[in-house]
Image (tube, rainbow, N blue to C red):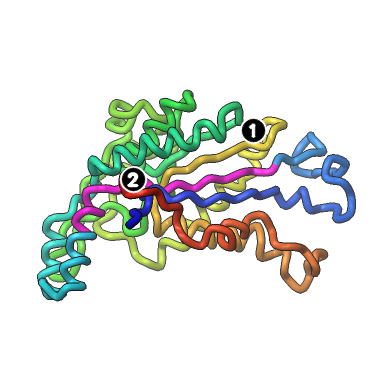
Amino acid sequence: SESPLYPLLAFASMASASSYAEPGVPRALRLSSSSSSPITPALRLILVRHGQSTNNVLMEELEGKRKSDSISLEEGRERWFSERSDDPPLSQRGEVEAEMLASRLYPELEGERVSLLCSPMKRALQTAKPLVDKFGGSCLVHPDFHESGGIYGRAVAGVCGPGKALTKQEIEEQFGYDTSLLPEGEWDRRAGREEESEVPKRARRAADWVLSLQLKEEAASRDPVMLIVMHADFIDHLIKALFILVVAPLFSPLSTFPLLPLPPFLLPLVLFPSPPRLPAQCV
């Protein structure tokens, strides 16, 4: 049988809204009000899920026991909240997956202008390390790229308490990443788990940042590549937010593209409906 490669890749190719400002005019000849250059580079976005974490190992064990009815729901929940780590590191398998990911992506992106970014959670920071070693430069840590729920501790009477997050200084010392966007002290100082209703709002804020004019202006004349290491659930939320900002307006009743073909942004959803898989001996 085959086992899935934990870090999941989602690819998107997005042009800024200004590149659609003059339909029917060749892209290189279009005028852009947001840049001094008449050509607005397309942003290629690669979203990467972190490698297997120690919490993933525990989760898989408990889910397996629940499916076989060897533990009750209450027993499973008690073990999860008592044994899970607030900010889990990669497992041994996860460390191997991170190295494999970097080895796979580097030959494909060598020579490209690649910006590396990641979540401030430990498992994402560790997954990004082999990528930084391969591509050189640094990795920008963004506080909005963390997993849904954030850092939280053990639940008492059904209420999750505060957890222990890495501090800005600890991330700098342990990884040497760019922490300029993080607050001083622990990056997540909530009193408990992030509310579910807050996750889509954070995803929209992250999507706005990814597509911001500042990033467009800093891009080189070649199409830039942004590679972000984050988390499975938040990747789903971010893709939805990007869809709303980039793709959905093109299909609105007021759109000038009533017969627009399938945007490149949607291709991975059609061509790659399931995660990439590698032979079991490779993971």
User: Which label was assigned to residue 218?
Assistant: 1
| Residue drawn at 23 percent across, 46 percent down | 88
In the image shown, does 102 or 73 lie closer to the viewer? 102
Q: Indicate which disc, 2 or 1, sits on the residue closer to the N terminus.
A: 2
- Residue pointed to by mark 2: 51
> Is 109 placed left or right of 60 in the picture?
right
Residue 40 magenta-drawn? no
| Residue drawn at 73 percent across, 70 percent down | 252
Amino acid found under the numbered disc labelled 2:
Gly
Amino acid found under the numbered disc labelled 1:
Glu
Q: Which residues are magenta?
A: 42-59
Residue 104: where, in percent of width, then height?
46, 37
Look at the picture and state if 230 lies above or below 135: below
Disc 1 is placed on an element classified as helix
How far apart in space, not on screen, are marks 2 and 1 (Cα)? 30 Å
> Is 10 placed left or right of 151 in the picture?
right
Res 30 quadrant in image: top right
The C terminus appears in which quarter of the rendering?
top left
